[in-house]
Amino acid sequence: MKMRETNRMKKVFVLGLSLTLCFAINALAEEQQSAKTQVPEQATEKVEKAAEAPTKPFVMMPYYSLSFAEGSYYVAKGPGSVIINNSLTNDLGLIMRLFNSHTLLFFYQLKYTGPGVKKQEGKDFQEKAMDHFLFAQYQFKINDELSVKAKYNYLTEYYRAGTNEPWEDGTFNFTRPGVDLRVESKYFGVKVVPVFQMGDMTFPNYIELKKTTTTVTESLEGMQDQAYMQLGAIVEYAPVKVTLNYDNQAYKKKTITDVTTGVETATKQVDNQVSLNVFSQIAAGEYFEFTPSVDMKFKTSNGTYVHLPSTSGPGSTPQPPVVIANGNDYNQYSVGMGIKWKITPNNEISLSPDYVMKQYTTRPPKDAKGNLVLTDKQYTNILQATLGYMVRWNPASQWFFYYVYQQNSSNVQQERSVLYNYTTHFAGMKFQFTY
């Protein structure tokens, strides 16, 4: 469970807002976008596995999955707060197999995440998101060892960050069409899958305030629009799976700030990320299963991090901005160990501790007054542990009950718009039905 931070970003579009908040909001927006360029793999894995199951040469099979989760989390920071959150997901699919070698998949997912159907206004409002995701895939099986998959996917997200935002006018609504091409080969027990993805992200309602050193001069549209591309490879040799990806995000309008003058340049921002994931699924006898994993991400960007020093009070003279070159670059390392105990064929207990370390390479942290500590580099560490219990009613339906503990620690001391040091407790349940 991760707390989304974009609900604090909407205020950037109110004229007259201080430049300090403008720069902070833009930095948060950049960190949110890389995750949005990824196709929801978990949403497609089940239907693709169902399509690979052996069956007759000519077949047409429907696919349906319903998932409902509800829980509440308590943020132990200051006075603390308790928030109830729901998630409802509906998957519809159609599998068509022709002549054993040709398979067509059609898939649609509707997902809602938010506080529930109760109307909320004012201080009780919580952010809400509604996703429409669909894809069409063609698979050609050349032989038992080699196959090709070509996929077109389209994602639309409606996101409400405030009470006065209708769904269609959400500031952070976006569309993301894309294509995915994979070649799967398996020889001598080793499965190798080269992956190529590309597409566009468009934010039709996003407006960003153009900034100078001291004033807001005009509003600009399309500053988060971008083209993305991914090159990767998946290698599996039981029980180990290794995934290596290179991601590129090229912004269409967003430019970087000159380090010396603090003025926007004509150079477009480009983000690059290399990620490596090693995952293993190890059965220990009949009742236990272990899933260790290691994940590494290395992000580089020509984007700059702009910081406006704090002023002494109303009427004081604004200080010139501090521009940090490559201020969005970071290295992130995470390790995890999933443990599953199969009590009976229909009952399981799981425990999954994870630890994440994120270290910026050039960006300094802020002290409690909002000033940069130039002798240090910003970091964030996250400790998370998930305890779950699963009950399988029948082959099609399951109940999950889980508790999540998360502790965030960072050397960033100023937390006016985003929390960096806090503890969260989350408890919830989830029902899933798949046909």
Image (cartoon, rainbow, N blue to C red):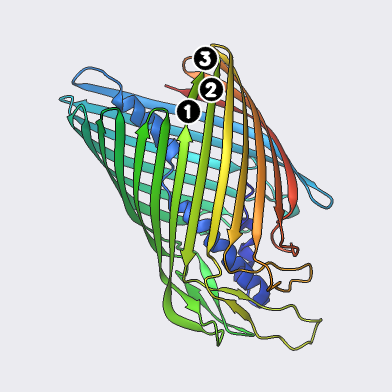
Q: From mark 3 to mark 1, how far is it between C-alphas?
A: 13 Å
Secondary structure category for the residue under label 2: strand
- Along the line of sight, the residue nearer the viewer: 131 or 72: 72
Q: Quadrant of residue 323?
A: bottom right
Q: From mark 2 to mark 3, how far is it between C-alphas?
A: 8 Å
Could you tell which of marks 1 and 2 lies nearer the N-terminus? 1
Q: Kindly identify which residue carries mark 2.
A: 289
Amino acid type shown at disc 1 = Gln
Q: Is residue 28 above or below residue 263?
A: above
Q: Is residue 148 left or right of residue 364?
A: left
Amino acid type shown at disc 2 = Glu
Residue name at image x 43 percent, y 36 percent? 43
Q: Kindly identify which residue carries mark 3.
A: 285
Residue name at image x 54 percent, y 66 percent? 328
Q: Quadrant of the C terminus?
A: top left
Q: Kindly identify which residue carries mark 1.
A: 281
Q: Which mark is residue 123?
A: none
